[in-house]
Image (cartoon, rainbow, N blue to C red):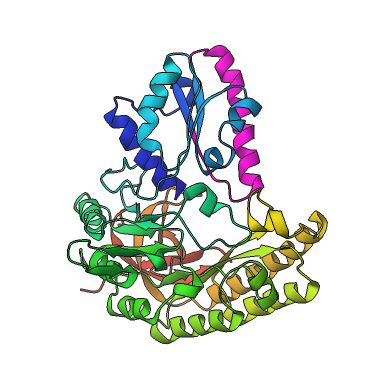
C-alpha cells in the first residue's frame, strides 16, 4: 500500500514540476514513505534518515522528509528527534506536498498530518515507479476501522472510505491498454469496500467491484489484498469461481490459532469461523492458494495458545505466511490496557517454531505441484540467471524456467519439474492452440 501511495505522490509532485531521481545524491528532496505497524519498520526509517546526514553535509541544499503512517503517528516529534528532517506529511495530506516543499525551500520546517474522512486520491493517475510494465497496484479504499487491539493503522490512516468504482475500473482499463496484464486491488480490508451512489442509492460491494474489474478483459489478471476473515463472503467466492482471470489466491490473516488470543486482539471472529471460511474457499475454489499473517508472543499468550497456532497451521496448510513477533505500538488499545509480558527471547523462540513449521508445510505443498502445468504470467529475468525467466501462476506461486522463446508480459504454460519451499522450478510446454 505504501508503494501505491508513493506512485500517487509521484503524480502529484510531477504535476507541480518535480521529477524523479535515480539516486539520493542527485536529489533536492528525499521523501521517505513509511510504515508504522511494527517498531522494526520505524527503526529502519530512523537509520535511513541518519544515513542521509552524511550526504546532506556534502549537499547542504538537500532536504529530507517523512511521509505516511510514521509521519502521522509521531508528527512534529520526528523533526525534533531527527534534526536533519525538514518536513513530515501524513497519508491524507499528499495534495499539500507542493506547498510544503515550497515552504521548505523558503527555509521553514513544515508539517501536515490532518486525517480526512473523504480523501481517496481517486482522480490522481499514479506514476508507475520502478514498474515492470506488467503488474500494477490499484488502491480501492483507504483507512480502517476494525481497531484490532495491537494495530496502529486506524490511528494513522483514519476511517474507511471507498473510491468510486468507475474510477477503479477506468484505471484498470487504462493499465490494460498500456500493456499491463495484472492488477492488485488494495485496501486495509478489501472485503468491506462499499460505494453508494448518492443520487440513485445504488450500492457496489467488493464482490460487484471484483466482477467489474474482471470484465475489463479476460486477459487481465485480478488479485486483491487484504481480506479480513470476518467479512469474507460466499458471494465473493462465487464471483471468483465464475471468472478464471480472478487469481486463485486469498490472503486471509489469522494472527492466532487461539480464541482467547483472538478476543484479546479484537479480531471479531473465532477459530471456528475462520476454519469455516477456509472450508468455503476450498469448496468454491479447490485450487486456491491460502496465505496468512500471524503474530507470535502477543500479550498474555500462553504455551497452550501458541500450540493452538501451530495446530491451526497444520490444519490449514498455508502456502505462505508473514510471521512476526508482537511489537507494541504506542497509542493502541493493547499499549494502554494489555501488558507486553512475553520476553523477547520467548517471542523469538515461538516465532522460530512457527517459521520452521511453515517452511516444512510450504515445501510439502510445493512437492505436490511437481508434474502440474500452469499458465504463468512472465514477469522478467530470474534474479540468479539471465538465461532463466520467472513469473507467477494464478495461485501467486513463483515459477522459474529456461527463457527459450518466452517474453515478459506474455502468458506461457509451464510444467513444474522441481521445487524449493519458496519457488517452483519448471519447463516451458507448448501453449494450447
The count of marks equals 0
In this rendering, is residue 326 above or below 372?
A: above
Q: Nearer the viewer, residue 84 or 59?
A: 84
Q: Is residue 49 magenta?
A: yes
x and y percentages locating residue 193 in the rendered image: 36, 64
Q: Is residue 136 visible?
A: yes
In this rendering, is residue 244 above or below 422?
A: below
x and y percentages locating residue 89 in the rendered image: 47, 34
Position of the C terminus by quadrant: bottom left
- The residue depicted at 34 percent of the width and 61 percent of the height is 377
* Magenta stretch prevailing secondary structure: helix
- The residue depicted at 68 percent of the width and 58 percent of the height is 334
x and y percentages locating residue 43 in the rendered image: 65, 39
In this rendering, is residue 363 above or below 11?
A: below
Give the image quarter of residue 273: bottom right
Give the image quarter of residue 379: bottom left
Span colored in magenta = 32-61
Image check: 251 left or right of 299?
Answer: left
Q: Is residue 130 visible?
A: no
In this rendering, is residue 210 above or below 335?
A: below
Q: Is residue 77 magenta?
A: no
x and y percentages locating residue 386 in the rendered image: 43, 47
Amino acid at each position: 500500500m505504501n508503494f501505491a501511495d508513493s506512485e500517487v505522490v509521484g503524480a502529484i509532485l510531477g504535476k507541480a514540476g518535480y521529477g524523479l531521481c535515480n539516486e539520493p545524491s542527485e536529489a533536492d528532496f528525499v521523501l521517505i514513505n513509511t510504515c508504522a505497524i511494527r517498531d522494526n519498520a520505524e527503526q529502519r526509517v530512523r537509520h535511513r534518515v541518519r544515513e542521509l546526514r552524511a550526504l546532506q553535509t556534502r549537499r547542504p541544499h538537500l532536504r529530507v522528509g517523512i511521509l505516511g503512517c510514521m509521519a502521522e503517528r509521531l508528527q512534529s516529534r520526528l523533526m525534533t528527534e531527527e534534526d536533519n528532517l525538514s518536513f513530515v506529511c501524513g497519508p491524507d495530506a499528499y495534495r499539500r506536498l507542493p506547498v510544503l516543499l515550497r515552504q521548505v525551500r523558503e527555509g521553514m520546517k513544515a508539517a501536515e498530518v490532518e486525517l480526512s474522512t473523504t480523501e481517496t486520491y481517486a482522480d490522481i493517475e499514479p506514476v508507475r515507479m520502478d514498474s515492470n510494465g506488467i503488474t500494477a497496484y490499484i488502491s480501492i479504499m483507504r483507512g480502517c476501522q476494525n481497531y484490532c487491539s495491537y494495530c496502529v493503522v486506524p490511528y494513522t490512516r483514519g476511517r474507511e472510505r471507498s473510491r468510486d468504482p468507475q474510477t477503479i475500473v477506468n484505471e484498470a482499463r487504462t493499465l490494460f491498454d498500456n500493456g499491463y496484464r495484472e492488477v492488485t486491488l488494495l485496501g486495509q480490508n478489501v472485503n468491506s469496500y462499499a460505494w453508494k451512489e448518492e443520487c440513485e442509492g445504488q450500492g457496489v460491494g467488493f464482490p460487484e467491484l471484483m466482477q467489474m474489474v474482471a470484465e475489463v478483459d479476460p486477459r487481465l489478471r485480478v488479485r486483491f489484498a487484504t481480506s479480513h476473515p470476518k467479512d469474507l463472503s460466499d458471494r465473493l467466492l462465487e464471483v471468483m469461481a465464475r471468472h478464471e482471470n480472478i487469481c486463485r489466491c486469498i490472503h486471509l490473516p489469522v494472527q492466532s490459532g487461539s480464541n482467547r488470543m483472538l478476543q484479546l486482539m479484537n479480531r471479531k471472529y473465532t477459530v471456528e469461523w475462520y476454519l469455516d471460511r477456509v472450508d468455503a474457499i476450498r469448496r468454491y475454489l479447490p485450487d486456491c492458494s491460502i496465505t496468512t499473517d500471524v503474530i507470535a508472543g502477543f500479550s498474555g499468550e500462553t504455551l497452550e495458545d501458541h500450540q493452538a497456532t501451530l495446530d491451526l497451521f497444520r490444519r490449514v496448510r498455508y502456502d505462505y505466511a508473514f510471521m512476526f513477533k508482537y511489537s507494541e505500538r504506542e497509542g493502541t488499545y493493547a499499549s494502554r490496557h494489555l501488558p507486553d509480558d512475553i520476553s523477547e527471547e520467548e517471542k523469538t523462540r515461538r516465532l522460530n517454531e512457527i517459521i520452521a513449521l511453515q517452511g516444512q508445510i510450504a515445501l510439502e505443498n510445493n512437492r505436490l505441484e511437481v508434474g502440474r502445468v500452469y499458465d504463468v504470467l512472465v514477469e522478467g529475468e530470474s534474479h540468479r540467471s539471465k538465461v532463466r525467466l520467472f513469473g507467477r501462476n494464478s495461485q501467486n506461486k513463483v515459477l522459474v524456467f529456461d527463457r527459450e522463446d518466452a517474453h515478459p508480459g506474455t502468458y506461457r504454460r509451464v510444467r513444474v519439474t522441481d521445487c524449493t519451499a519458496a519457488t517452483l522450478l519448471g519447463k516451458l510446454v507448448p501453449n494450447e492452440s
